[in-house]
Amino acid sequence: KKGTTMISATPAGPALAVAALPNFIRLTVAFSINHACVTAILNLSVSLLGDNGSYQSGSLYLTYALTALFLSTSLLELMGPRSALLLGAALYCVYILSFPAALLTPDSLPAVGIAVALVGGIIGGFAAGFLWAAQGTYFALNARLYAAEHSLEVQEANTFLASVFAAIFLGIEVLLKVLPEALSPLKNIEFTLVHGANKVSVQNLTVACSYSILAIASVAGLLTIADLRDGQRQVEAAE
């Protein structure tokens, strides 16, 4: 067809031996869990941390803007999409872990609570500044591999994989956003770590810890995806 690109399957090499669709599904599930944990806890930041949550969100958005403007492209070129995805997802875990850390910080140490929130926000903003760019680049590589594997037009592969991504991404996001409601029976239970310390909501701490555990698990999932850059070179050579 005029104006479209058809890629024919090539003799299987080390990278092209990767099954494109299972690899993409692993990417999508892991990325979606990681991102859903971040967006869910970001929406709860003020209710969980009060004023410190506002400071944290402000530092996140500022760092995000600066990273996206000045560092995203260079980082992606330096690391490649897979390594950038892993780094960004791991840094998102640090951001999420700052919530239980801040919740457990005694009220008698307000400066420490603010510092924990700000550091978490800065790290999360840095990750956000390049993570979606890395995902987009990896998506394109995986789509070309899928097109080569099935002798499809690249646009057709893009459309199919985009629909798979959207379904999984939105489904996981909805599921994780209702997690706080599922834990609402814990709402009125509080505890103190040491005598005289501030009370900590069991629901809030459980929510923060649950998102932290899921985010860490998602990084483990991203470790299973292939580095597709060698496969991309083989596909380009076959065009």
Image (cartoon, helix red, strand yellow):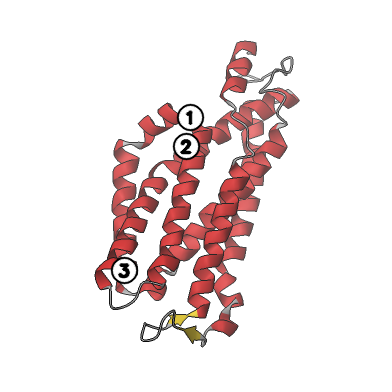
Q: Earlier in the sequence, mark 1 or mark 3?
A: 1
Question: Tag on residue 80?
Answer: 1
Placement of the N terminus among the 4 image quadrants: top right
Label 3 Cα neighbours within 10 Å, binned few <14 / some 14-19 / many ≥20: many
Residue at 48% across, 47% down: 90
Question: Tag on residue 91?
Answer: none
Residue at 36% across, 82% down: 197
* Residue furthest front in the image: 195
Q: Quick check: 115 above or below 182?
A: above
Between tags 2 and 3, which lies in front? 3
Q: Which residue is mark 3?
A: 113
Report if the CB atoms under discs 1 and 3 are less than 8 Å apart. no
Residue at 54% across, 63% down: 211
Residue 224 seen in this snapshot: yes
Label 1 sits on a secondary structure element that is loop
Between tags 1 and 3, which lies in front? 3
- Where does residue 37 sit, x and y in percent of width and height? 52, 59
Label 3 sits on a secondary structure element that is helix
Left or right position of 231 against 48:
right
Q: Which one is nearer the viewer's eye here, 217 or 41?
A: 217
* Residue furthest left in the image: 111
Q: Which residue is mark 2?
A: 84
Q: Quick check: 95 above or below 18?
A: below
